[in-house]
Image: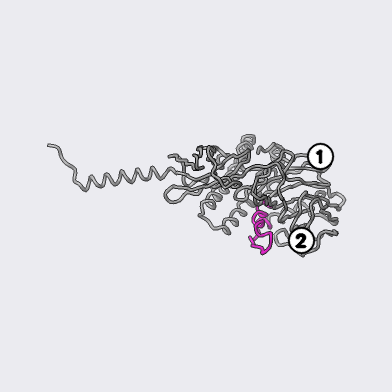
Amino acid sequence: MKQQLPLTTISAVCLAWLGAASALLAAGGQISGQVVNGTTGSPVANQTVQLLMPRGGMQQVATAVTDASGRFAVAKSDLSTDSFYLLQAVFQDVNYHAPVKFDDRGQARVDLTVYDATRTAPPVRIQSARIIINAVGDKAHIQEMFAVRNSSDPPQSYVNVDGTFLFHLAQPAGDPTAAVAGLMNMPLPQPVNPGKGPGDYFIQYPLKPGLTVMMVAYDSDYASSKLDFTDSVAYPIDNLELLVTPPSLSVDSSLFKSAGPDSETGGQKYVTENVPPNTELTASLSGEGATSEAASAAGASSSQPDIKVQPNSMTQFGSLTLACFLLFLLWGLGVRVAKEWPQWKAQQSASQIQKALEAEVEKLFNSLADLDELFAGGKIAEKPYWKERLELKARLVAKLKKAPPALLESYAIRHTPR
């Protein structure tokens, strides 16, 4: 005679099995949404949508195609709902991205807005701009940041192989570098192309409707303790700040007016507004530049500034400026983007000291990635997020300074793919 299990035992086994099955399903995730053309207001059918993992070097982990109503769904059992993903749609050769945020059930709703592309220049103006000049020894390090607004109506993305952002640099010592602030203010390095005339340059990055933050950096000669700064851009500028360090430098300009000390850089601030397109942005600087040691100390102390909401047109640009500041610090050490770290690591010496340094730097990079994922998932508030991010980057800069100069130089000259 067979022995029957008690009903309570059967119920317990079933509940345990259901619990295990639920846990297994929770390990995966499902993403749904719609792709809409922001120019026409219509859904986009037959549009390929890619699911990317930034931490894996923009590794593609899944794809989907929209139906007639522009809707799509991505469901994979191996999607980690605790990881950070991006959705990408390439529409008329322009990339559009949106972060993926899962709820407690492992579901995510992500809608993507794309725009018709045009080669005809739309109304473009620079809403806010900052030029930072830092004289150190016989070099003047110049960093320029522009919040460029595309106010096309109907909204369209401006694309042009001859350049969407045109600028002129009078005295660059070497090739300038450039980047665009992407999602979550992450800098995306961009090629700088020579223009038609001497000192003319352009960037081909598509200008989508709304704000795009462009960043340009270069060095100029300061061996004679003097700099006649003259740059220009092809667009009107609503508000422009010139920040000069060290603050002891003398500044003579018919365009910029003194606005006192700047709390973020520790330098002197000069301002102007309503600048017409192609206006020469001129200023004559003179005086003893900072020593390398003093500049390093100033950089370390200013790498953790307070985040302030400014009640003017720089408000939307303020937090981006902090990211740009850190970007240029890393550029100065030859570090372009975190995804190149494995390539760099593969070329390093096998010495124990170097291995220890690599491990520490890799740990800091991973900490930054983890912090970004927490912020993207809404698990950390904005102010502590930025504070901890700045602290991590300051520690990363300090570690990278210990690397051999030849190491950083070899890394800096490698081409960074788009």
Residue 310 among magenta residues: yes
Q: Amino acid at mark 1?
A: Lys
Question: Which one is earlier in the sequence, the residue at label 1 or at label 2?
Answer: 1
Mark number displayed over residue 196: 1
Relative to 144, residue 409 above or below? above
Q: Is residue 3 visible?
A: yes
Q: Amino acid at mark 2?
A: Lys
Instruction: Find residue 298 and report its horizontal and vertical position in percent.
Output: 72, 56
The colour scheme used here is: one colour
Image quarter where the N terminus lies is top left
15 on left or right of 96: left
**Distance of mark 1 from mark 2, alpha carbons?**
33 Å
Q: Is residue 399 visible?
A: no
Q: Residues within 10 Å of mark 1 (few under 14, many from 20)?
A: few
Instruction: Find residue 44 and report its horizontal and vertical position in percent.
Output: 55, 41
Q: Residues within 10 Å of mark 2 (few under 14, many from 20)?
A: many
| Secondary element at tag 2 | strand
Instruction: Find residue 106 and report its horizontal and vertical position in percent.
Output: 44, 47
Q: Are marks 1 and 2 in contact (CB under 8 Å)?
A: no
Query: Bounds of the magenta span?
Result: 301-325
Relative to 382, residue 95 above or below? above
Q: Of residues 103 and 375, which is closer to you in this image?
A: 103
The structure residue drawn at horizontal position 60% and vertical position 52%, both measured from the top left corner, is 392
Which residue position is annotated with label 2?
269
Image quarter where the C terminus lies is top right
42 on left or right of 286: left
